[in-house]
Amino acid sequence: PNTLQQALKPSHEARVITEATRPFRITHVNEAWTKLCGFNPEEACGRTLRMLQGEDTDVATVNELVKDCVEQKATSMEVTNYDKQGRKFRNFLQVCECDLHE
């Protein structure tokens, strides 16, 4: 999705929406994201995706993603993250620039 309206539509795809600027705080998570990560919206909103990082998360990959976000570039990465219970999972993140006016 490349508009906020599209991103907020129901989806079986895990979606998280963050602020467009640092520190990229979470503003919305969908049900699929909640099932994947184990955090409900109240636990996730206001925090950053750092909450999913752990020992095997590749910091260099995350830093590259953050750099692209700061430069407002669409980007993607695959990284090891951890759910609320501390279980590892591979997470494919795709960051899209959304047009907030549509």
Image (spheres, rainbow, N blue to C red):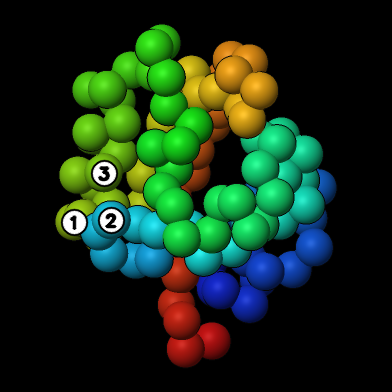
Residue 40, above or below 46? above
Q: Residue furthest top?
A: 56
Quick check: can you spot residue 96? no
| Residue labelled with disc 2 | 23
Q: Identify which residue, 70 or 41, lies in the foreground.
A: 41
**Percent x, y for residue 29?**
63, 56
Residue drawn at x 39%, y 66% as measured from the top left: 19
Viewer-closest of 16 and 55: 55
Answer left or right for 36 relative to 19: right
Residue at mark 3 to residue at mark 1: CA–CA distance: 9 Å
**Which residue in the structure is indicated by mark 1?**
71
Q: Nearer the viewer, mark 2 or mark 1?
A: 2
Q: Nearer the viewer, mark 3 or mark 2?
A: 2
- The residue sitting at 46% across, 60% down in the picture is 46
Give the foreground label among 3 and 1.
3
Estimate the spatial distance between the alpha carbons at disc 3 and disc 2, rounded to whole Å: 9 Å
Q: Nearer the viewer, residue 24 or 85?
A: 85
